[in-house]
Image (tube, grey):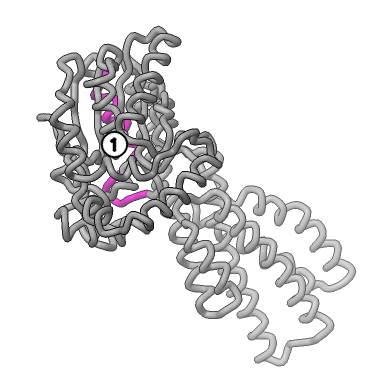
Amino acid sequence: MRIIYLLFDCAVTCAVPMIWLFFGLPFGALGSGILFATLFLYINVMPGIYTKVSTKFAVLAGGSDLLVTFILSVCVQSALLIYRIVTSCFTPELDVPYIIISVIVDFIIFWNGMIRCYVTSYQLGITLRVLAAVFSLIPPVNIIFLLIIIVKTRQEYLFERKYGAMEREKAAAHVCATRFPIMLVHGVFFRDTKAFNYWGRVPKAIERCGGTVLYGNQQSALSVAQSASELAAKIEQTVMQLGCGKVNIIAHSKGGLDSRYAISLLGADKYVATLTTVCTPHRGCMFVEKMYDSISEPARLKMAAAYNAAARTVGDTSPDFLSAVGDLRESACARMNAGTPDSPLVSYRSIGSYAKNSRGGKFPMNVSYLLVKKTDGANDGLVSVESMKWGENFRLVSPPGRRGITHADMIDLNRENIKGFDIRSFYIDLVSELKNQGY
C-alpha cells in the first residue's frame, strides 16, 4: 500500500508541471491550477495512510514519504528534461516555465517533508539536523544526508508502530496500576521540570498503562544527606496529601543514595514500600575520587561557584556542587554504607547496565566510558557494574549487539530507540512486576 501511495504522490507532483509542458495555455494554466488546488494539496496534507500510531508519528511518516516523493519526482522531471534536450524537443517557451513550475512544486514537497521530520523526530538528533542543514547546498553530500534522514525517520515510524501495538495491549490490562504510586527520583545535576523530563518518554508510558507517577523534586546538587532530607519531606508530604499509605521509589544514579539515606536515617521507611535503584553508585566511583583529588582546590571552588550560580537561575535555592560530587567518591560511599543499614520495612532491588565499547551511547558517555573503565572496570559511562549492585535482587541489562546501554540510556535521556532494547517497555515491565508482587 505504501508503494501505491508513493507512486501516486510522485505522479501528482510530476503531473503539475507536465500539464503545462504538453498542453500549454490556456488549458495548461487552468489544469495546473485545478490540480494544484486539489491533488497536490491533498498529498501535502495526506501523503499516505498511517495507522496504529499517534498523530505525531503519522506526521513523521508522512514527512519521510514526502522526501521519497521529492527524490522520485526530481528524477522523473530531470529524465524528461534530458530526453527533450537530447531529442531536440526543447523549446524555451514551454520548457523554461516547466522547469520553474517543477522547482516550485519540488520545493514545496521537500520543505513540507523536512519540516515534518525535523519537528516530530526524536531519532534524528541535534547533530544530524545541524550537519544536514550545513551541507544542504553541497552535492552529493546533501543527497547522502537526505537519504540518512529518510531511513532514520522511516525506522522510527516502524519502531513506534510496533511499540504502540504492545503498549495498547498492556494499557488495556492496566499492567502498571500498582497498589502504591511510583515516585521517580532523579540523579545529580538535574531537576524535575515540565520543560524537560529527566525520565524521557518513560513516565507517560507508565501512566498510559494505568500507573500513577510522582517525582522526588529534590535540588540538582546537594550532599546525600541534604538531598535525602528534601526527599524524605517530599515523600511524607505526598503520602499525607494523597492518602496512599506508601510509595514505590524508582531512583536513578545519586538518587538511589539519597533514597537509601532517607529510608534508613530519616524515617522515610514507613512511607516507602519498595526501592528500586537504577545505575546507582552504591560503592561510589573511583574515577570521581581520582578526578576530585587531582583538581586543585582553587579550581574546584571556581567550578563550584560557576555551577551553583547557574543552578540558582533554574530554581535551586541552595546548590552545593562540591558536596554533591564529593559524596559520589568511593571513600564517601563506604562511610555512608557503614551507617545506613537497609530497613526491614522496605523491599530493595537494584538494576544496572553497561556500555560495551566507547561507541556505545552518545556524548559524553562515549568519552567518559574509557576514563571510567581504567579505574572502575565494566561501566555504563559513569558508574561501574560492581558499584550498581545492592541487595540480593540485582538485574543487569545486557541487550544483544555491540552497543550496550549507558547511564543516560537508562533514563531515556536522549529519547533514543536502541536496537534490541526498548526503555519504555523495560519500565512498564518493571512497574508491572511491582504490581504483581502486591506493591
Instruction: Answer with the quarter of the image where residue 154 lies.
Output: bottom left
Relative to 222, is 129 on the left or the right? right
Relative to 195, is 21 on the left or the right? right
Q: Residue furthest left?
A: 392
Of residue 93 and residue 186, the one placed in the foreground of this image is: 186
Of residue 176 and residue 299, the one placed in the foreground of this image is: 299
Report helix, strand or loop for mark 1.
helix
Q: Is residue 387 magenta?
A: no
* Range drawn in magenta: 417-435
Q: Residue furthest front?
A: 298
Q: Is residue 46 above or below residue 197?
A: below
- Residue 54, position in %: x, y? 51, 38
Q: Which residue is mark 1?
A: 426
Q: Is residue 426 magenta?
A: yes
- Residue 337, position in %: x, y? 16, 32
Split into 4 quadrants, where in the image is the C terminus? top left
Crowding at dot 1, Cα within 10 Å, few <14 / some 14-19 / many 20+, comes out as some
